Amino acid sequence: MDHHSSWFHLLPFYDRLLGFFQNNFSESVIFRSGLFPKERIFETVHHIIAALLVVIILAILSLMANARLKQIEKCLVPSPKITILNIFEVFVQVVISIMKDTIGADYRRYVPMVGTLALFILVSNLIGLIPGFISPTNNLNTTIGCGLLVFIYFNIHGFRTHGIGHLTHLANPMGTWWGWFLAPLFLPIELIGLCVRPLSLGIRLAGNMIGDHKVLFAFAGLMPFLLPLPFYFLGLLVSLIQTVVFCLLTCVYISLHTQEDSH
């Protein structure tokens, strides 16, 4: 299957869904073989269906884990078997460890956001390893959307922590009286650096996942039984690493904009 074909294409409502987005949201297409194309066409909605599938999978797994947690007496001793609850426990421990080391003592406030994003990205990356499925993170629309969500989030908390100082810091990052004379130089540089962050998050994630899955399925097409096995392991490793990288950079951005002594 090529980049725009998957099992999702066999869904009976696929063509209607694609037509709906083309008729109602074609003006929102800003990337198609380059930025701001003349012909704004929705080429695929696979990433949208895949993202919804990931949300459904996470919802089911979360409900299963929650049902298990309600039986608290059975959770006091961890099960020797691999269970959904054990997997979630390891995942949460890793995320919290990253957040503690990066954000500091105030990390708990940001766990729901960072943890949810990390879960979504991890499952999205892994679902692309299944033949016939396309990962939501294979598409820049999904990854830049996640990047924009992070951008909005850390700016909201920047204003919460520093008020108007969150903006004035861009013009005078040194915080001295003579620093205002350099504001015409620093402000555009800081603004560009700030606005590039969601793009860098999205492009890095999408680029790595597209490259990894293309290599995997190229070798799977040559010899589908034995040759792809090392590349499946590599794909699993890349999926985990890219989730950690996205999570770590998100924590770094939150830390930079919320530390009390950063301004």
Image: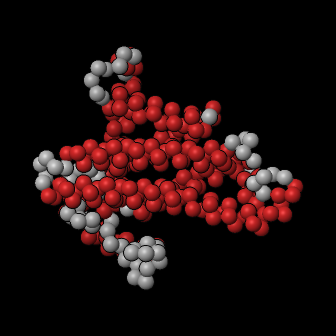
Looking at the picture, tell me which residue is in the foreground, 83 or 247.
Answer: 247
Residue 40 visible in the snapshot: yes
The percent coordinates of residue 104 (x first, y second) are 62, 34
Q: Residue furthest toward the right?
A: 177
Residue at the image point whose x is 19% and y is 50% from the top: 228
Q: Residue furthest toward the bottom?
A: 38
The percent coordinates of residue 65 (x first, y second) are 36, 31
5 sits left or right of 74 in the view: left
261 sits left or right of 44 in the view: right
Residue 79's place in the image compared with 173, above or below, is above
Residue at the image point whose x is 41% and y is 48% from the top: 242
Looking at the picture, tell me which residue is in the foreground, 42 or 262.
Answer: 262
Residue 116 visible in the snapshot: no
Residue at the image point whose x is 64% and y is 51% from the top: 156
> Dividing the picture into quarters, in which one does residue 192 lie?
bottom right
Looking at the picture, tell me which residue is in the foreground, 147 or 263.
Answer: 263
The percent coordinates of residue 63 (x first, y second) are 36, 36
How are the colours assigned in the image? secondary structure
The percent coordinates of residue 27 (x first, y second) are 45, 77
Q: Quadrant of the N terminus?
A: bottom left
Residue at the image point whose x is 31% and y is 20% from the top: 79
